[in-house]
Amino acid sequence: MENISDPPHALPGDFAIWVFIFAELTVFGVLFSAFAFARAAHVDLFNQSQLALNRGLGAANTLVLVTSSYFVARATRAIKDGRGLLCGHWLTGALGLGVVFLALKLFEFHQDYAHGITLSTNLFDMFYLSLTFFHFMHVLMGMAILAVVAYKAYAGRYGVEDHAGVETGGSYWHMVDLVWIILFALVYVIR
């Protein structure tokens, strides 16, 4: 059992990713705050417009990203146990779920457009499309990071003593997942 007086553990991965994650969370926090203030000023518009969203696809994407984060956590555990090939497999699974997320979101964007939801429809739709597209781009970047980490795991470049790259990529992916959970609740659910 850890003693309270023990020094805190270092953050997983490279410190630079945590600076980047903090900056990204700050940007999303500002955007979420702007959404909340706009919602408070236009409650009826936001509630009515929210009904046009496909909550089922939003919920499915939440499940997909939470599962992908589990896969990344399993990859991190595998590399700490010296199982690089298994780490690569878990990361490949997370990447596959990233593809599923993107496909579902593109389908949802297509449905939205077919139903007349655009950036210029109203204030809610502008926020909804901007926030979800901004997050979409972060998923793409997270997938690029995970692809590089998976490649290196398969190539044997990580191990029990040197796995900071897996933790770094995993930390970014978990941030992307966390942001989606907040975004889903804020945009799709909370009324």
Image: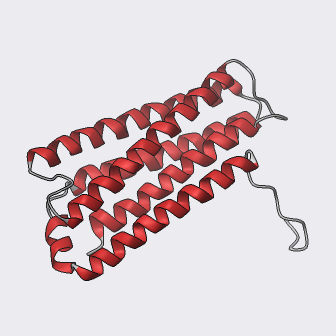
Q: Is residue 28 above or below residue 114?
A: below
Q: Is residue 77 above or below residue 182?
A: above
Q: Is residue 115 above or below residue 6?
A: above
Give the residue at the far bottom of this rendering.
41
Residue 119 in which image quadrant:
bottom left
Q: Residue at x 42, y 59 (%)?
A: 181
Q: For this view, does 46 lie left or right of residue 22?
A: left
Residue 88 in which image quadrant:
top right
- The colour scheme applied to this rendered structure is secondary structure
Front residue of 14/100: it is 14
Q: Residue at x 62, y 48 (%)?
A: 171
Give the residue at the far left of this rendering.
115
Q: For this view, does 55 lie left or right of residue 167?
A: left
Q: For this view, does 61 lie left or right of residue 87?
A: left
Front residue of 134/53: it is 134
Q: Residue at x 22, y 44 (%)?
A: 109
Position in image of residue 106 (x %, y %): 26, 39
Position in image of residue 175 (x %, y %): 55, 53
Position in image of residue 155 (x %, y %): 69, 17
On-image quarter of the C terminus: bottom left
Q: For this view, does 39 lie left or right of residue 34?
A: left
Position in image of residue 173 (x %, y %): 55, 45
Give the residue at the far top of this rendering.
155
Give the residue at the far front of this rendering.
120
On-image quarter of the N terminus: bottom right
Number of marks: 0
